[in-house]
Image (cartoon, helix red, strand yellow):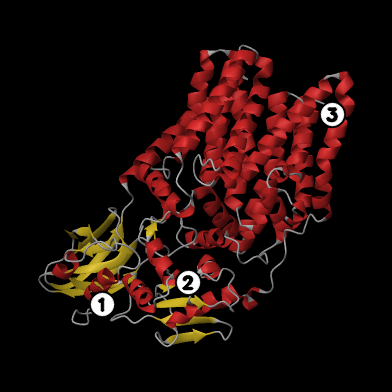
Amino acid sequence: MTGKRTWLIDSLILICLTGILIQPLFRIEYLDNWKSIESTFIGDARMLSEHLPHPGWQPLWYCGTRTDYIYPPALRYGTALLALAGHVSFARAYHLYTALFYVFGIAAVYWLVRIGSGSRGAAWIAAAAAALLSPSFLLLKDVRHDSIYWVPQRLHALAEWGEGPHISSLCVLPAALAAAFAALRKKRPAVLALAGVLSALVVSINFYGATALAILYPILVWSVWNGERNSDVLWRAAAIPAIAYGLCAFWLTPSYVRITLLNLKWVAQPPETSARIIFAAILAVYWFLSRRFARGSPGREWRVFVFGAALALSVYVLGYLYFGLRVTGDPVRLDPELDLALILAGMEILRELWIHQKLRVAAVVLGVLGFLPGLRYVRHAWFPFPRAAPIANVYEYKTTQWVHDHLPGERVAPSGSIRYWFDAWADNAQPDGGSAQGMLNQIIPVAAWQIQHGDRADLAIQWLQALGADAVVVPDKTSFEVYHDYAKPEKFRGVLPSLYDDGHGTVVYGVPRVHAGIARVVEDARLKGIPSFTGGDDSAGLTKYVAAVEDPARPAATLAWEGDDEAEVKASVKPGESILVQETFDPAWRASENGRTLPIRVEPVMGFMLIDAPAGLHDIRLRFEKPLENRLGEVLFFVTLIVLAGLVVRGVFRA
């Protein structure tokens, strides 16, 4: 049997066997797991599908933000296109997407180990271990206890916590590393192109996978260069990330990176300089030792990479859990990547034992013992996929549908699992959003905390008015809502009018506003006299701001959306007045009337848009233009495609 044929047959067998393990994921629509954040990806794909090919603005989350900022594009567009092409629900399409990548990921582990070690048997064992085991369970008690029946962490994170993008990115990671390993060792233009494409795919699905790639790729480059001692390795090593960025340039813009890093403070603690120094020092020791014992030895490249990867991810994840070393982000989230690294290292240890005839029995015993925990998972392989009740009976569905049916077009503030599922079935505008990613307006978390966790109804109401919210959904501790974010849900009782009470602890309250909608005529002098808020409990500042915005002496203004990127604003303005649009300011917005451009400036208190218009009656067209950085990124993207085509053609002719 030829080598290429064994690769194909082995890969197909692994894909089929893994498909059996997760078979319900290919068919299921909704999991009975309404706390899962997968809801935000399902809702995001639904919203995108209605505005293809690419809306520039997302008006339903975070009081408006750029569509690109919310999440990398691969999963969101993949889910949307699968739903449209297959005529299935977006929930079904999301689960199908993640299932396809999951089975691909186990085969990718096989490819990585077979390319790296050259051993077919080792590749099979490593792939089986990735499908059945989580070595980190031995080291992380809380993680082990969180996974009933010891479901492997990659699958547990996917099914229980909705980490579909992260795990899908992880599944591409071994394939990207395998292609890079092959491309760095020898001059293979087509494989070099493939490595760049797969690396771009890792980044385009999820940033946790991208973080792991950023950690492991330099180790891979060092391992190969240290063994080959050929300057061509460095040129090829630079070409792969250049190709990857070129393919991502149309969305991974400088402002995207800035906003993503800015929002990290809402989901993770800041990194520590001391932790980074310790991390760098440990890697320096690894560099010194590997240089000393593997320099100029191509046969040791794979071993240097494997143990370097295990060391780096162990320090990154375990260093935080055991010693509080926070290198960046939330290190625990890379636990599935740590599993992969430990499996590769364990496989290399078994392979080394097997090479020595006298130690083969020890290798077999250790291998069998290592796989024993997987039996517990295999006996309950379909446990992670509980099927939900009919959607019409689900609390989150009924609540969000009531809002859509009775408060159409109004901005409403939900919380907890309702917030997660708020846009899964219909367009519902909210001041907050899916998962605190891509949030352009940084005052929203401050307001949300005060609304949900503060004990003062007056402050919460003022924040709701300042955010342009017409209603608020308040589940109490007896409700079916999962997270119960409200510390004092009773604070609104008797203070706000009840619009809807489900009889089970959830009430939708109306927020008093002088006019509905998010357009206002405001007096410039009153806004200029309001300083920036000192915190969520700045009652004096909030009172002044709300009085200026909710002024009954000012005439009503209206805003009507036409798609996601355009809106029509109608207002009558007097001298000394401006038009406030309670939508987050972005420099890419343009305002025009009868062919004349009107200035838009940032409202200094809440970060919304102020349109400067002369006195009179106005019918203004608001339009979001594609930013220059995205247009330049598109040019780089197409240039990269041309380069890729050249590499592939060159590789074909070389073959």
Which comes before the other along the chain, label 2 or label 1?
Answer: 2
Count residues near mark 3 (Cα–Cα under 10 Å), then give few for <14, some for 14-19, many for 20+.
Answer: many
Q: Residue placed at 56% from the left, 61% from the top? A: 42
153 shown above or below 61: above
Amino acid type, callout 3: Ala
Q: Is 268 on the left-hand or right-hand side of 333?
A: left
Q: Which circle marks residue 363 in the picture?
A: 3
Distance (Cα) linking label 3 and label 2: 55 Å
Identify the amino acid type marked 2: Pro
Which residue is located at x 63 percent, y 26 percent? 305
Q: Amino acid at mark 1?
A: Glu
Q: Quadrant of residue 118?
A: top right
Q: Quadrant of residue 584?
A: bottom left
Q: Dot 3: what SS?
A: helix
**Is 191 positioned to the left or the right of 373 in the image?**
left
Spatial CA span between label 2 and label 1: 22 Å
